[in-house]
Each structure stands twice: as C-alpha cells, then as structure tokens.
Amino acid sequence: MASQLANTSQSPILSVPYQAIYLSIPQHIALSASSQQSSAVGMNTSVLRVVADKACYIAIGANPSATTGGHYLPANLPEYFACNGGDKVAGLQSATGTNLFISEGA
C-alpha cells in the first residue's frame, strides 16, 4: 500500500499521513448463496480495496472460495488487502442482494 504525506501551510497539522493507492481496474460482483469469484486482478496489482453494500464473507487467492467460516467483511466499510498479481476475490453473501466492489491498486 502506498502512503503519502499531505503538507500544506494552511493545515493546522503540517504533515498529515493518509492512506492512498494508485487505482486501476474496478470490479463488481453480485453475490449469492454460493461463493462467487471475480476476474483475476492485473499482474502489477499489489493491493485491493474491497467494500460491500451488505455484510459478506470474502477470500483472496489464486482460486479462492468464500465460506461462512472465512473472513467477514462488514457492510459499507472499505478494507485494504495485500494480494499477488493474478489473484481473485471470492465473496459469499450473508444477506440477499449483496454487491461486492473491488478496486485494484499498486
């Protein structure tokens, strides 16, 4: 994950760290009661920003399968994950109508 420092003379705090990634290709997965996989991320992707509109379960890897015993992703809370180029994200809904949004970054 790339981080930057903001430094402005107008800010009361002169150096404010913030989280940032260089965005690349976005993906959207409509989740269901069975694990759904994204397309493989780009080979230069090293970080993913993942957010869902409803709580769900996720997995990341070469051929991941999301399960209810896996990683829980709360609704509307973006999370950042390290990944390898070519990885996929799998999602499993915990409520009907869940959408998973993935942003590739470097």
Image (cartoon, rainbow, N blue to C red):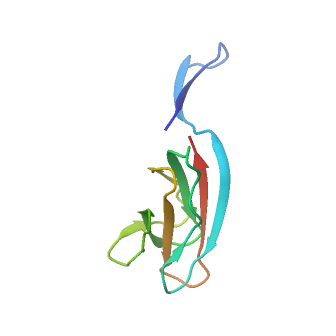
Q: Quadrant of residue 59?
A: bottom left
Residue 102 at what x, y percent from top left?
Answer: 59, 59
Could you tell me which residue is drawn at 58 percent across and 39 percent down?
A: 21
Image quarter where the C terminus lies is top right
| Position in image of residue 49 (x %, y %) | 55, 52
Q: Residue furthest top?
A: 9
Quarter-of-image position of residue 18: top right
Q: Which residue is drawn at the image coordinates 65% and 66% (left, top)?
A: 28
Depicted 12 relative to depicted 31: above or below: above
On screen, residue 10 versus residue 12, left or right, reads: right
Give whichever of 36, 20 is nearer the camera: 36
Q: Residue furthest left?
A: 69
Measuring from the top left, give residue 51's x and y in whole percent: 56, 61
Q: Position of residue 35 (x, y in %)?
A: 48, 79
Q: Count the marks: how many? A: 0
Front residue of 34 and 55: 34
**Residue occupying image coordinates x 38% and y 77%:** 67
Residue 47 in the image: above or below residue 88: above
Q: Is residue 39 left or right of residue 90?
A: right
* Vertical relation: 12 (above or below) 45: above
